[in-house]
Image (tube, helix red, strand yellow):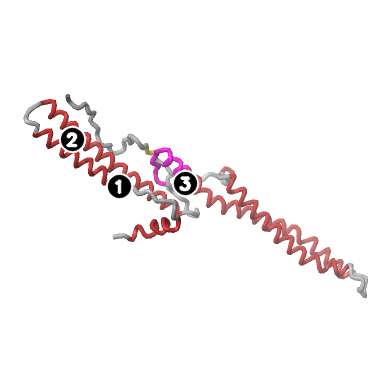
């Protein structure tokens, strides 16, 4: 009886992987013209950005309400005081003066707060949306390409960590596929030696080499470690100090 084993070839540069596919990211080239202001998309993650804008708007309205109470409250109390000795004309002029200027200043402050919250949320959501897309791709068995951030984006360090994680995973997958291809090649050689008959020395040699390659595959698989969730603090500490091990 002879073994029927299909020969596997290690993945070539640029070829798709067998079990994990690679989705390459094509960021815009440096120096490419930016679209006009009115054609830019500032809301890329509506749920997150609208929540942030709403919170900023509520906080601004609360501040404006407290400022208006602090400004107009004493004047109104003074106008309604029964102990006044004048007719209150001067106080009424002050009241009308502040009333005529406060509300458009409050409107400008509110507009600035909303615009700035949109801008800040866009700098957060801009890299956050492709990060979530890449994490979903990893969960589906795909290895995405590296992400790029703009000059004023936030989450730059998180993007670098995700890129490093994807690159490290891709490197280990390549090593596993190369070791798997070498193991299959040795088993195929063993099968051919058994089919050819003889004293069996070539088959034993090929089998020994295949066993060695299988051990190498096992060592590569042992490099993956599952972090237990039973002790979150300890697990987080292990991840933090892992790069310092020599």
Mark 2 to mark 1 CA distance (whole Å): 22 Å
User: For mark 2, what is the residue?
Assistant: 186
Tell me the magenta residue range. 133-146
User: For mark 3, what is the residue?
Assistant: 131
In percent of width and height, residue 152 lies at 50, 55
Nearest the eye: 35 or 84 = 84
Residue extending furthest bottom?
A: 85
Nearest the eye: 224 or 135 = 224
State yes or no: discs 2 and 1 in contact (Cβ < 8 Å). no
Locate the N terminus by quadrant. Answer: top left
* Kind of element beneath mark 1: helix
Sooner in the amino-acid sequence: mark 3 or mark 2: 3
Residue extending furthest top?
A: 1
Q: Tell whether position 141 is magenta.
A: yes
Answer left or right for 50 relative to 97: left
In percent of width and height, residue 123 lies at 53, 52
Residue 40 sits above or below residue 83 on the image: above
Q: Which residue appears at 12% of the width and 33% of the height?
A: 203
Structural crowding at the residue carrying mark 1, measured as other residues with C-alpha within 10 Å and reported as few (<14), some (14–19) or many (≥20): few
Mark 3 to mark 1 CA distance (whole Å): 27 Å
Nearer the observer, disc 3 or disc 2? 2
In percent of width and height, residue 87 lies at 93, 70
Mark 3 to mark 2 CA distance (whole Å): 41 Å
Structural crowding at the residue carrying mark 2, measured as other residues with C-alpha within 10 Å and reported as few (<14), some (14–19) or many (≥20): many
Residue 239 appears in which quarter of the rendering?
bottom left
Nearest the eye: 225 or 79 = 225
Sooner in the amino-acid sequence: mark 3 or mark 1: 3
Answer left or right for 142 relative to 47: left
* Kind of element beneath mark 3: helix
């Amino acid at each position: 009886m002879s073994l029927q084993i299909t020969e596997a070839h290690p993945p070539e540069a640029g070829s798709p992987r067998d079990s994990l596919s690679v989705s390459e990211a094509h960021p815009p080239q440096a120096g490419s013209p930016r679209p006009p202001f009115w054609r830019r998309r500032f809301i890329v993650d509506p749920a997150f950005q609208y929540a942030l804008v709403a919170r900023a708007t509520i906080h601004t309205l609360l501040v404006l309400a407290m400022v208006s109470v602090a400004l107009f409250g004493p004047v109104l109390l003074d106008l309604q005081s029964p102990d006044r000795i004048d007719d209150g004309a001067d106080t009424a002029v002050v009241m009308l003066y502040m009333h005529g200027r406060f509300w458009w200043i409050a409107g400008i402050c509110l507009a600035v707060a909303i615009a700035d919250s949109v801008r800040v949320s866009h700098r957060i959501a801009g890299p956050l949306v492709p990060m979530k897309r890449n994490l979903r791709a990893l969960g589906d068995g795909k290895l995405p390409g590296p992400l790029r951030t703009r000059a004023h984006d936030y989450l730059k360090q998180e993007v670098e960590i995700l890129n490093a994680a994807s690159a490290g995973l891709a490197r280990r997958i390549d090593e596993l596929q190369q070791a798997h291809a070498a193991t299959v090649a040795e088993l195929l050689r063993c099968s051919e030696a058994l089919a050819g008959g003889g004293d069996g020395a070539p088959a034993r040699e090929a089998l020994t080499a295949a066993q060695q390659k299988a051990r190498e595959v096992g060592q590569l698989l042992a490099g993956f470690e599952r972090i237990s969730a039973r002790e979150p603090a300890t697990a987080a500490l292990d991840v933090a100090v892992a790069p310092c091990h020599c």
